[in-house]
Image (tube, coloured by chain):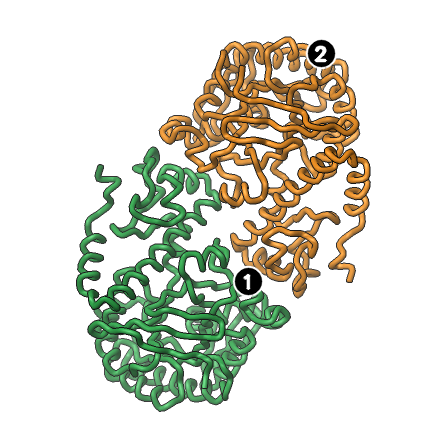
Chain colours: A orange, B green
Amino acid sequence: MSHMDFQVLASDGAARRGVMRFPRGEVETPAFMPVGTYGTVKTMTPEELSGLGAQILLGNTFHLMLRPGTEVIRAHGSLHEFMHWPYPILTDSGGFQVWSLADKRRISEEGVRFASPVDGSQVFLSPEDAIRVQHELGADVIMQFDECTPHPASRQQVADSMQLSLRWAARCVAAHGDHPSALFGIVQGGMDAELRLESLQGLLALPLDGIALGGLSVGESEAERLSVLDAVMPSMPIDRPRYLMGVGKPEDLVAAVCRGVDMFDCVLPTRNGRTGYIFTRFGMVKIKQAAHSSETAPIDPACGCYTCRNYSRAYLRHLYRCDEILGHRLCTLHNLYYYLELMAGLRAAISAGELAAFVAAFEATRAAGDPVLAT
Amino acid sequence: MSHMDFQVLASDGAARRGVMRFPRGEVETPAFMPVGTYGTVKTMTPEELSGLGAQILLGNTFHLMLRPGTEVIRAHGSLHEFMHWPYPILTDSGGFQVWSLADKRRISEEGVRFASPVDGSQVFLSPEDAIRVQHELGADVIMQFDECTPHPASRQQVADSMQLSLRWAARCVAAHGDHPSALFGIVQGGMDAELRLESLQGLLALPLDGIALGGLSVGESEAERLSVLDAVMPSMPIDRPRYLMGVGKPEDLVAAVCRGVDMFDCVLPTRNGRTGYIFTRFGMVKIKQAAHSSETAPIDPACGCYTCRNYSRAYLRHLYRCDEILGHRLCTLHNLYYYLELMAGLRAAISAGELAAFVAAFEATRAAGDPVLAT
C-alpha cells in the first residue's frame, strides 16, 4: 500500500473535511493545489507558497519529461529537491496535455505517439511510461494515464474512450506495483451519467488510493459539469480522496466541495494573476483599467495578503502598464492567497457544520461588486 | 541646509568609508544603489532588497514623470509610499535619459524639449522642472539637471556643454531653495582633465550637498574613465559624498572606490540577471550554457545568497529555457547580493586598513575562472 494516509475528520452534508498524510507532510482537504508546470509555480518561490498555506503542488509530467527531462531531475534526487519544495507533490500523467496537442498525436491501444512541442521529435507515451516517469519524478501522488474524452462526442466515442482509459488504468496499476507513492484513477465518460458510473465502478475494482474526475473543463457548461458531479459523487468511496481535475473558478470550487470533492488544481489564479485579472471576495478586479490609475486603496482593503497590505491599486496598475515582473508576482500572490484562504474557510465551515451559511455569504459577497470603485 | 548628514569614518589611501544619515535611514558608504527605474527594482520586493543590505535605491525622474506621473505618486505621499520602500531614495534628474533620446530632443539654454517615448507628446524639461519633479517625488537625494556630453566630441563642444551644465546647476540651486532634501551637482567635461576640473571648481562655488561624476559609461574606454577619475578625485571636497553615476562592472567599482568614490548605481546586476548573465567572485557565469544542464552545484558554492543556498545551476538553466519569471528573480537576487556584498567587503577592508590586500584577492579570484565547470 502507499505511504499516503487519508482520514475524514468532519462532514457537513456531502462535503467533507479531511487530511492526507505523507512522509513529506500533511495536506488538509478540501485542498487547492497550485500548478507548477515546469517545476515552478510561475513567479513564486516555494517559501512564498508555503507561507500562503499551500501544502501540495501539482507538477506536469508531460512538460517535465520534455524539459528538463527526468535524468536531470533524478540527478537532484526528485522533483522536490530540483525545485526546492520539500512538501508533497502530485503529478498528472500527461494525458490531458497529449490530448490538447490535437492533430499532432495518434492514440492507439498501446499508448500515444506525438510530436514534441519543444523540438518536434517523435515521442511515445504508454501507461507504463507515464507511471515510470512519475516514479522518476518522485511524486507523492501519481495519476493514471488516461485519454481525455473530447467534448462534444458521440455516445459511442465517449464509451470507447472511457473503456480505453479503464484498460490503461489496469496497466498503470500493474506498472505501479508496490511503489510507495499513491496512485489515483481517473473517472471518464464525458457528460453521460451512465458511462461515468460505469467508469467509476471499473476503477473501484482496482487497488487505487484515490479517485479523480477527469475530462471536465473541456468546454462543457457549468450545468453539464454539475450534473456529472451530481451523478458520480454519491457513488464515490468515502475512504479515499476525490480530486476534480483542472477546475476552476471560485464558484466552481465551492459547488464541488459541497458535493464532496476533496482536491483541486487550476491554473486560473496564477495565469489570471499574470494578466492582471484579480480574484477577490467581491468578484473580479481588472487592474489594468484606467479607473484604478490614482486609486490609493489596495485591491481589497479587507484582504490580509502581502500585496493588499502594502500596495495600492494605482501602483499595481502602474506595474502592469510598464510590464514590470513585480506586478505579475504581486497579483499571482494575491490570487493564490484568495484561493487558499477560500479553501481554509470551507474547511472551517465544514468542521463547524456551517457550510450552508458560509456558501450563502460567499455568494452574496461575490455578487456585491467592488466596494472601492463604488466610493 | 539639507537633512542629510555625511561623515567619513575611516580611510585607506584615497578610499574612504563613511555614512550618510537621513531621516529615513542610514546609508553606509561606499554604497551601491540598485536601480528602480519605474518605482520597482525589476523583479524584486523592497523587503528582499533590504534583506540583501540595500540601504538606498535610485529612481528615474524621467521615467516616473511620464509613467505614472507625479500626481499619482503624490496621491500616495511620496515615491517611498508608492513603491513601499521606506528608506532613502536618490532620483536622477532625467538629463541622461533625455540625452539618450538622441534626435528626438532639442536642447536650448532654457531646457530640453523632447517627444515622450510613451505617447509621443511634446514634453519640456528645464532645470527648474527637474528640481520640482524631484521634490514632488519626495526623494532624499536629488540631482541637478545636466547635459550628458556626447562622446566623442570636440573640445569646444565639450566645453560648451560643460558650461551649460554649470549654468543649469546654479538654476537648480536657486530652484531648490531651502528644501530639506540633499542636492548633488554633476561634474561634466568629457574626457578632458582641464574641463573636468573647471566643472568641479564651478560646482564648488555652489551650496551643493554632494558631487557626482556624470558623462561616463557613454562608450569611453576603461583607461579614459580612470584618467578622468585620476584627474578629478584628488580635488574633490573630502566632506561631501562623491557619486560616480551609472558605473559599472565589479572591477570598475573597486577601482573607483580605491580613488575615493562613495556612491554607485548601475543597471548591470539587475539587467544581466534577467538575461542570465551572473556575476560571481570568479567571473561571469552564463547560465543558459548547455554546460550547466545537469549541474547540481549552485552558481557559487561559497555564496550565501538565497539562490545559491537553494538552487542548482541545472534548475536555473531550466527556468531560463522555459522563460520562467522565477529564473529572472533568482539571478537578479544573486547579482544584487554579489554587488552589495562586494561593497560591504570594501567597507570592511577600508576600516581595517587592508584595502590593497582585499583588492589583490578580489582580482586574483575574479581571474581564476569557474571552479564548478573546472571539475
Q: Residue at x 52, y 9 (%)?
A: A174
Q: Residue at x 26, y 68 (%)?
A: B351
Q: Nearer the viewer, residue A286 or B113?
A: A286
Q: Amino acid at mark 2?
A: Glu
Q: Is residue B140 above or below residue B313?
A: below
Residue A336: percent from left, percent from top:
61, 43
Quadrant of the rendering where the N terminus of chain B is positioned: bottom left
Residue B222: percent from left, percent from top:
24, 66
Q: Amino acid at mark 1?
A: His
Q: Which residue is mark 2?
A: A198
- Marked residue chain, label 2: A
Q: Is residue A152 left or right of residue B347?
A: right
Q: Nearer the viewer, mark 2 or mark 1?
A: 1
Let me know if residue B125 appears in the view.
yes
Q: Residue at x 22, y 39 (%)?
A: B374
Q: Is residue A35 left or right of residue B167?
A: right
Let me know if residue A225 appears in the view.
no
Q: Secondary structure at mark 1?
A: loop
Q: Is residue B136 left or right of residue A193?
A: left
Instruction: Please say if the residues under marks 2 and 1 sit with CB atoms less than 8 Å apart.
Output: no
Q: Residue at x 54, y 18 (%)?
A: A106
Packing grade of label 1 (10 A; few <14, some 14-19, many >=20) is some
Task: Mark 2 vs mark 1: tell me if same chain.
Answer: no
Quadrant housing residue B206: bottom left
The disc placed on residue B84 is 1
